[in-house]
Image (tube, rainbow, N blue to C red):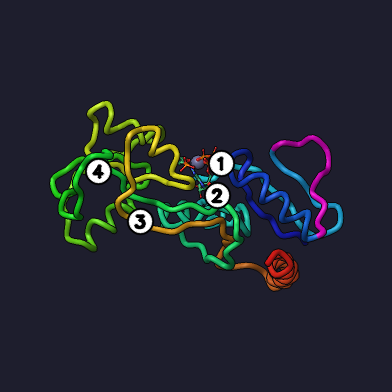
């Protein structure tokens, strides 16, 4: 019996996810298989997937566990449980407008906001009773104001340099995010045991880092 975990195939969370296993003393470096890897010294199988697909796979039980950004977990609204914050992949989902705009929250009313996070943004707008038009785009959100597609954007920010380069300024933070461990809601008793062993190691690694 093994536990199956989905991690990002390539991208910002990949290296830190792999490093976490390594620091947990779990060797997943077998062979050249780019889709799947079986740990040599722990009952763990690792699937390499696009981050957007991970919540669905974990809900469906194709993977028992997953490592993905909280931003993706909250956007996808799947039936998965967040077990642990992992301390990497930190960023925030923020609203930004053109640098010389005078801004208060009511500025957004009736405006077009470009984002890859329509679900989280809509919840935020509803919470503040703002009616605005959400334009969902899958990438390069930060160019939307410059090309006349939107008056504001809602996008992930870490250093802030992308906003700066595009003449934008951050005006609201909607969500703080980092990589988290998620789980399927029904695991076998044996898998629960493996999960507890894995969690114990992850928590030890986190503690050692502080
Ligand atoms: O191929 P796949 O679908 O798996 O990857 P992806 O391209 O969708 O995601 P990827 O690898 O870019 O990001 C994976 C996860 O990393 C995100 O879901 C976040 O949880 C986390 N993360 C942390 C970030 C950032 N920091 C980040 N800065 N994700 C994206 N960005 C982008 C942001 O969208 C903007 O374009 O970086 C730019 C801003 O960065 P700064 O430093 O200029 O502010
Ligand atoms: Zn993605």
Q: CA distance from mark 1 to mark 4?
A: 24 Å
Left or right: where does residue 23 sit relative to residue 210? right
Residue 84 drawn in magenta: no
The residue under label 4 is: 134
Q: CA distance from mark 4 to mark 2?
A: 25 Å
In-front residue for pair 185/116: 116
Q: Secondary structure at mark 3?
A: strand
Front: mark 4 or 2 = 4
The residue under label 3 is: 173
Of marks 1 and 4, which one's residue comes earlier in the chain? 1
Task: Give me the residue at 50% from left, 51% from top.
Answer: 56
Q: CA distance from mark 3 to mark 4?
A: 17 Å
Q: Position of residue 26 (x, y in %)?
A: 80, 56
Q: Are marks 2 and 3 in contact (CB under 8 Å)?
A: no
Task: Look at the image and tell me whether residue 12 can be seen.
Answer: yes
Q: Are marks 3 and 1 in contact (CB under 8 Å)?
A: no
Residue 141 vertical position relative to residue 108 in the rendered view, above or below: above
């Amino acid at each position: 019996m093994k536990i199956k975990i989905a991690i990002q195939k390539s991208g910002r969370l990949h290296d830190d996810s792999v490093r976490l296993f390594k620091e947990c003393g779990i060797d997943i470096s077998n062979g050249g298989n780019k889709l799947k890897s079986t740990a040599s010294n722990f009952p763990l199988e690792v699937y390499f997937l696009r981050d957007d697909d991970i919540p669905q796979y974990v809900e469906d039980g194709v993977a028992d566990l997953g490592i993905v950004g909280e931003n993706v977990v909250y956007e996808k609204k799947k039936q998965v449980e967040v077990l642990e914050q992992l301390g990497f992949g930190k960023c925030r989902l923020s609203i930004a407008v053109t640098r010389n705009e005078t801004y208060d929250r009511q500025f957004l009313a009736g405006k077009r906001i470009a984002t890859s996070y329509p679900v989280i943004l809509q919840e935020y707008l509803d919470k503040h009773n703002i009616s605005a038009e959400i334009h969902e785009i899958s990438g390069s959100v930060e160019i939307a104001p410059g090309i006349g597609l939107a008056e504001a954007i809602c996008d992930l920010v870490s250093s802030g340099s992308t906003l700066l380069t595009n003449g934008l300024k951050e005006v609201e933070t909607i969500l703080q995010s980092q990589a988290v461990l998620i789980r399927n809601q029904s695991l076998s008793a044996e898998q629960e045991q493996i999960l507890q062993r894995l969690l114990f190691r992850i928590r030890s690694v986190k503690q050692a880092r502080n």
